[in-house]
Image (cartoon, coloured by chain):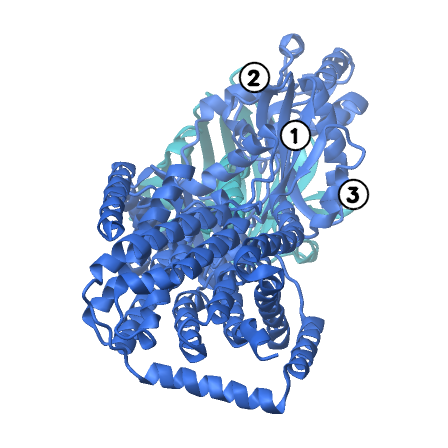
Chain colours: A blue, B cyan
């Protein structure tokens, strides 16, 4: 037939074109991404919120925090210094900082300039309400040998405002400055911990950098260990490195395991080397999937690759469709066998694609990518199996082993024997009872943490760093919007008052807000006015010999200080912690963040923003968890919709009753899997639901195989068994993944496949009825 | 691939430490540290020595011996802008196992105590630990180490130059770190049988001269003093 010569050529042309496209896509290296945030739902429609979040995320993707611990403080500093020098020389870091060299002139300048703007509420109140006490304290501090040295000399600040500002700076955490070395040191667990900060040249989503940084850390850890020092490190880079290693490991295990298993199965069953060519459609499928993914999304996520590697098991089903006919077709010839199975093959492709593409409509970019990858991959594998493979297998005479068929026959006989004793309706009732019991025990659980398979060691270290440094940051923050700066500071102050209460109640460790850095213009004005009256109270200072003219000059100078706004307050070195909080002018107004520390009850936060205009809590984790829960419902709806679609598709070949039966079986299988999760005590997660969504689509294929019964019941059962086995080999292996989300997915697909296989024979039940 | 969420908190750690600590927290301990350390050290030196040629180690060894020292002080603060120095007077008690009592008498009365718990000031309600200093455990530990004759802490922060002999010597402290150099030019301590003067020269042009008189190492702690340390 001409098509037998034309099809392979056409397909080869297509393949070359796709290969060329792939080559072009990879011209700048692998278009891979490891950024988890690309995979979770983008539930932030607000550009400002997004900007604020990026501001919060940025340093974590670039910075690493290391504590160098040693029982001897000097040793700790020495090791930190060596480490800092070695890391700086490594070329991986833009900046490695282990000691502090403060720019004192700049600090002095800022303190002097901000005397009215930065004076704390308490000091302000004392100056205005109790000027006598204010002056008295100033006199005391001039004689106090233990107040230390003010950064600003007395004659430039007779009233001591800069000293008060210095002392009212929020100090949290347990890290102290070692005055000699300039190192920042915390004491805990009988050791001195020197703080080292390293900022990398690239970010965590660079594919190479995190691994290099993690390796460097490992080597440094060993080196420090020889010197008796311990390293604790915390960084988003380490999570990225770990995630990347894990993904590589899992792709190797899942992909490799499935490949080896399937090849072995093919060899054992068909006893011909050339049958290994059945793997060509799988490779072509992976290629199509990857190309489609990069074409649509710009790049491919490593998680897509992990989950996508399970596609191997599904793609190999297409060649199996006609290869298994070798048990009944004698002699077996590739093209005739294909023609015989083509309708089933095409239906199978259509139903699987419907199943996968249903995933694409969930709000998870991760699943959209996987859906596109898989659907494109299946189309590629199908085309290859239909157009190319028969040509490659032309002339091969398959004489398959007899044992698989015997197993299938045994199974079939067993089933017949069972049905003789227990009729189908009773079995159905028993299955439904099993389902009811299992569903009763099923728990639902959804948490963003299911995406994170971080090893406990990384988490423990991060917690240790937080404990030793005394910093317990929270991922939530407040976003405050206003029409202008004045209103913004007022709104922040209203929020601060509420947060202060939480701090006093020990519900919150602390917070950072711009109103801590700069006073309202009205407050600065109040201070100016209060200074007018100060001359009546400064006699004690005159008694010490301070010239009245100096004091008058100072008051005049203070009153002439320009009113500071947020922008000018943020220019000095003291403002560094606040700088990231200021989002500046946006949408005809201004906005800023308020960051939080040491929160132990997130529910309390939401209440704080109530009734405060322009104040909004941004709680990405909480929002994500809500999206998870909401998605569970929409996933169930999608599942039903995909079933309806499949029924519509199957009405044509099988009639309405047949189509309904073919779809009912996978649904029952899904129900059984759900019940099994309940019986096993496993929670139902969004991912297990997605798994079931998928398995429904795949197992429709088995029902079709069993219903068509080309070549007899036992041969069809064998075909189904092989298809289920290969699919299970790839999906089942996902269950070993250390990412809870992936392993949940694998587990539910495995269960679904097992039940689908067991229930598939009932697709042809009508013949027995 | 799983970094951002798990490490969300890390971002904050990095952020906070970057900003907060390096600037604010550290700034405070920085500002308050050298004074007590230097005072502690110079008081340690107020012991009569008899050896002809002595080095820092010998000095330290000697300093570690006496358990209680009583004396009085006059502090002169020379501010660039004032024609007259700010003069204050008082007495002190240094007890090896307890700490230091610093009793300012004129022109205003104020008692201070430095002990393992930190720096305390006496008000109408008794001793009050100064806020913000309680976290400065490192500072106090260093100070107490100095009290016990361990000068290694100071040697790390300052270059120590000892001239003269046990009965007539001069110790110069020159800051080593960039940070300290921005505050002090140097610290001079003159002594004979006792420490006579301590002079702190600040880079901004101000200086503090502390004169110690009648330091005596032969009196035990009075009951009132024991009571003060006990609280």
**Closest to the observer, A330 or A176:** A330
- Residue beneath label 2, please? A156
Image coordinates of residue A502 in percent, x first then y, are: 74, 45
Residue at mark 3: chain: B
Q: Is residue A259 above or below residue A22?
A: below
The quarter of the rendered structure image containing the C terminus of chain A is bottom right
Please state the horizontal and vertical placement of residue A500, each as a whole percent of the image. 74, 39
Q: CA distance from mark 1 to mark 2?
A: 24 Å
User: Based on the displayed image, in which of its 4 quarters is residue B97 positioned?
Assistant: bottom right
**Mark 2 crowd level (few <14, some 14–19, many ≥20, 10 Å Cα):** some
Point out the tag, 1 or 2, that comes first from the N-terminus.
2
**Distance (Cα) linking label 3 and label 2:** 32 Å
Closer to viewer: mark 1 or mark 3: 1
Are the residues under marks 1 and 3 on the same chain? no
Above or below: residue A112 compared with residue B74: above
Of circles 1 and 2, the one toward us is 1
Secondary structure, mark 2, is helix
Cβ atoms under marks 3 and 2 closer than 8 Å = no
Q: Which residue is mark 1?
A: A516
Tag 3's secondary structure?
loop
The subunit letter for the residue under badge 2 reads A
User: Label 3: which residue?
Assistant: B124
Q: CA distance from mark 1 to mark 3?
A: 32 Å
Badge 3 and badge 2 both on one subunit: no
């Amino acid at each position: 037939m001409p098509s037998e010569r034309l099809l392979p050529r056409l397909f080869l042309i297509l393949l070359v074109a796709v290969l060329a496209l792939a080559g072009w896509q990879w011209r700048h290296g692998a278009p891979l991404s490891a950024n988890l945030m690309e995979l979770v739902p983008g539930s932030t429609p607000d550009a400002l919120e997004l900007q604020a979040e990026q501001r919060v995320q940025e340093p974590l993707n670039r910075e690493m925090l290391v504590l160098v611990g040693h029982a001897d403080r000097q040793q700790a500093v020495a090791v930190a210094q060596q480490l800092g020098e070695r890391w700086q020389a490594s070329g991986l870091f833009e900046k490695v900082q282990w000691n502090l060299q403060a720019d004192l002139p700049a600090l002095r300048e800022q303190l002097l300039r901000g005397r009215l703007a930065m004076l704390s509420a308490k000091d302000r109140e004392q100056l205005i309400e109790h000027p006598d006490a204010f002056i008295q304290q100033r006199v005391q501090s001039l004689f106090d040998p233990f107040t230390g040295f003010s950064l600003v000399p007395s004659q430039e600040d007779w009233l001591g405002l800069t000293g008060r500002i210095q002392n009212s700076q929020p100090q949290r955490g347990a890290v102290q400055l070692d005055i000699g070395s300039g190192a920042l040191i915390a004491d805990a667990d009988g050791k001195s911990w020197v703080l080292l900060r390293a900022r990398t040249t690239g970010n965590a989503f660079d594919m190479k950098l995190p691994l290099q940084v993690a390796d460097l850390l490992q080597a440094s850890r060993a080196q420090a260990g020889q010197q008796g020092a311990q390293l604790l490190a915390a960084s988003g880079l380490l999570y990225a490195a770990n995630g990347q290693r894990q993904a590589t490991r899992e792709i190797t295990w899942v992909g490799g395991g499935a490949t080896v298993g399937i090849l072995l199965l093919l060899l054992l069953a068909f006893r011909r080397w050339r049958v290994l060519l059945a793997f060509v459609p799988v490779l072509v499928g992976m290629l199509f999937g990857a190309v489609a993914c990069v074409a649509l999304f710009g790049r491919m996520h490593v998680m897509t690759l992990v989950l996508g590697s399970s596609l191997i098991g599904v793609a190999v089903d297409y060649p199996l469709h006609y290869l298994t006919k070798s048990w009944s077709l004698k002699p077996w010839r590739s093209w005739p066998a294909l023609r015989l199975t083509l309708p089933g093959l095409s239906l199978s492709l259509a139903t699987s694609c419907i199943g996968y593409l249903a995933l694409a409509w969930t709000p998870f970019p991760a699943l959209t990518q996987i859906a596109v990858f898989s659907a494109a991959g299946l189309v590629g594998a199908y085309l290859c199996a239909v157009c190319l493979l028969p040509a490659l297998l032309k002339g091969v005479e398959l004489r398959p082993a007899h044992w698989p068929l015997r197993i299938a026959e045994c199974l079939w006989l067993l089933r017949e024997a069972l049905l003789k004793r227990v009729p189908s309706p009773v079995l159905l009732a028993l299955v439904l009872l099993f389902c009811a019991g299992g569903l009763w025990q099923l728990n639902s659980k959804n948490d963003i943490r299911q995406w994170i398979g971080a090893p406990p060691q990384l988490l423990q270290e991060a917690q240790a760093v937080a404990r030793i440094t005394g910093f317990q940051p929270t991922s939530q923050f407040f976003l405050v919007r206003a029409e202008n700066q004045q209103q913004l500071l007022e709104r922040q102050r209203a929020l601060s008052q509420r947060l202060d209460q939480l701090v006093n109640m020990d519900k919150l460790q602390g917070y950072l807000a711009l109103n801590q850095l700069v006073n309202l213009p009205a407050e600065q004005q109040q201070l100016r006015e209060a200074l007018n009256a100060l001359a009546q109270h400064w006699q004690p200072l005159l008694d010490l010999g301070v010239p009245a003219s100096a004091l008058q000059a100072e008051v005049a100078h203070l009153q002439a200080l320009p009113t500071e706004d947020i922008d000018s307050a943020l220019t000095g070195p003291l403002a560094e912690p606040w700088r990231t909080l200021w989002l500046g002018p946006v949408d005809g107004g201004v906005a800023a963040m308020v960051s939080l520390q040491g929160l132990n009850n997130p529910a309390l936060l939401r209440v704080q923003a109530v009734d405060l205009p322009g104040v909004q809590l941004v709680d990405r984790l909480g929002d994500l968890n809500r999206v998870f829960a909401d998605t569970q419902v929409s996933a169930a709806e999608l599942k039903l919709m995909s079933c309806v679609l499949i029924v519509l598709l199957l009405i044509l070949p099988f009639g309405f009753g047949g189509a309904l039966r073919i779809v009912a079986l996978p649904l029952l299988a899904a129900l059984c899997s759900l019940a099994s999760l309940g019986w096993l005590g496993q929670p139902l997660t969004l991912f297990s639901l997605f798994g079931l969504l998928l398995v429904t689509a795949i197992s429709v294929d088995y029902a079709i195989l069993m219903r068509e019964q080309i070549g007899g019941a036992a041969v069809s059962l064998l075909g189904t068994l092989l298809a289920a086995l290969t699919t299970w080999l790839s999906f089942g292996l996902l269950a070993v993944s250390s990412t809870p989300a992936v392993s949940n997915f694998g587990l539910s697909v495995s269960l679904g496949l097992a039940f689908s296989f067991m229930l598939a024979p009932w697709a042809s039940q009508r013949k027995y009825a | 691939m799983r970094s951002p969420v798990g490490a969300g908190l890390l971002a904050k750690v990095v952020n906070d430490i970057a900003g907060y600590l390096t600037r604010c927290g550290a700034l405070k301990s920085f500002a308050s540290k050298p004074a007590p350390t230097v005072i502690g050290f110079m008081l340690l030196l107020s012991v009569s020595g008899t050896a002809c040629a002595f080095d820092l180690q010998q000095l330290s060894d000697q300093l570690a011996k006496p358990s209680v020292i009583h004396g009085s002080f006059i502090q002169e603060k020379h501010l660039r802008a004032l024609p007259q120095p700010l003069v204050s007077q008082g007495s002190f008690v240094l007890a090896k196992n307890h700490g230091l009592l610093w009793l300012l008498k004129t022109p205003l009365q104020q008692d201070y105590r430095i002990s393992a718990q930190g720096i305390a000031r006496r008000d109408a309600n008794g001793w009050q630990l100064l806020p913000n200093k309680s976290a400065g455990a490192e500072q106090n530990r260093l100070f107490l180490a100095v009290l016990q004759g361990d000068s290694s802490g100071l040697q790390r922060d300052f270059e120590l130059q000892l001239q003269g002999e046990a009965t007539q010597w001069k110790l110069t402290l020159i800051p080593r770190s960039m940070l300290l150099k921005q505050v002090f030019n140097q610290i001079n301590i003159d002594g004979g049988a006792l420490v006579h003067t301590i002079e702190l020269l600040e880079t901004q042009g101000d200086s503090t001269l502390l004169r110690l008189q009648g330091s005596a190492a032969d009196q035990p702690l009075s009951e009132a003093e024991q009571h003060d340390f006990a609280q």
